[in-house]
Amino acid sequence: MSTRDVTIGGFIVLGVVTVTLVAASWAGRLPRFGEVVDLLMARRAWRVLVVLIWWWLGWHFLVRTS
Amino acid sequence: MTADDQPRDGTAHRAVVLLAAAATAAYAALASTTGVNTVGAVVAVAVPGAAVAVLTLRRPSRTVTAAPALRRGTAIWAVVVLAGLLWEAGAYLGELTVGQYEHPTLSVLLAPLLSDQVIRFAAWSLWLYAGWRLIRR
């Protein structure tokens, strides 16, 4: 197994885990991602982090793709 | 406020949401025409980024009592988000030191998909919508 396979495999595992968590939240076994963001947005320090991550996603995927 | 004002408020709220949706779609359509690694794309991300930062960060902190289930769920989501960010960062470092083929980042893997105009528009719309939701939280 090459390092490329391991890297891509990691993204696939993370994707499967995310889909599993979304399914669990729809079934009511876990808070929805939106509820978690709501909680984090209540405190200014966490809000800075959430906005930074959102901004970075835009910059990383829409401005530069490397 | 009288009972007569309530439907008017509802209509006004719907109008604001529709206007925001139209503006978001128009902005996404414009932004999706910018190429990667261009000044236009940097500006297109910087403008909503600055707007969301100003509108969200000027709000004072709120006191929220989180139920244990919400706290546990937050920890679980945080671990997954952190793992994703670290994996992407690791791939990026590998890309710089070893090579892009051996350590592709998620953005490199998605680049062919994001070069499609329709998908790029959808990605811009999704990102702008997420920013809009952050302002409203």
Image: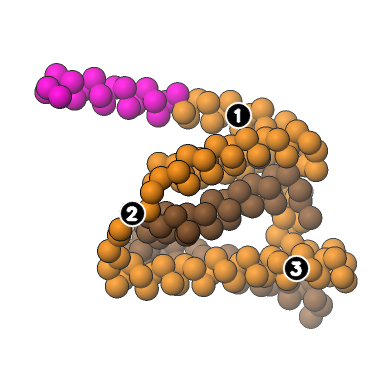
Chain colours: A brown, B orange
Type of the residue with mark 2: Arg
Few, some or many residues within 10 Å of mark 2 (<14, 14–19, 20+):
few
Marking on residue B62: 2
Q: Does the magenta stretch include residue A21?
A: no
Q: Do the residues labelled 1 and 3 touch (CB within 8 Å)?
A: no
Q: Are marks 1 and 2 in contact (CB under 8 Å)?
A: no
Q: Is residue B86 above or below residue B22?
A: below
Tell whether A1 sits left or right of B121. Answer: right
Type of the residue with mark 3: Ala
**Is residue B125 something that shows in the picture?**
no
Q: In this view, does B13 lie above or below B86?
A: above
Tell whether A63 sits left or right of A56. Answer: right
Query: Magenta segment, which residues?
Result: B1-19
**Is residue B39 something that shows in the picture?**
yes
Marking on residue B91: 3
Which of label 1 and label 2 is nearer to you? 2
Query: What is the distance, in whole Å, between disc 3 and disc 2 at their CAs?
Result: 37 Å
Check the picture and name the quadrant holding the N terminus of chain B.
Answer: top left
The residue where tag 1 is placed is B27
Type of the residue with mark 1: Tyr
If you read the primary sequence from the N terminus, does the residue marked by circle 1 or circle 2 appear first? 1
Which of label 3 and label 2 is nearer to you? 2
Q: Position of residue B100 (x, y in %)?
A: 85, 63
Few, some or many residues within 10 Å of mark 1 (<14, 14–19, 20+):
some
> Which of the chains bears the disc numbered 3?
B
Quadrant in the picture for residue B89: bottom right
Few, some or many residues within 10 Å of mark 3 (<14, 14–19, 20+):
many
> Which of the chains bears the disc numbered 1?
B
Q: What element carries label 1?
A: helix
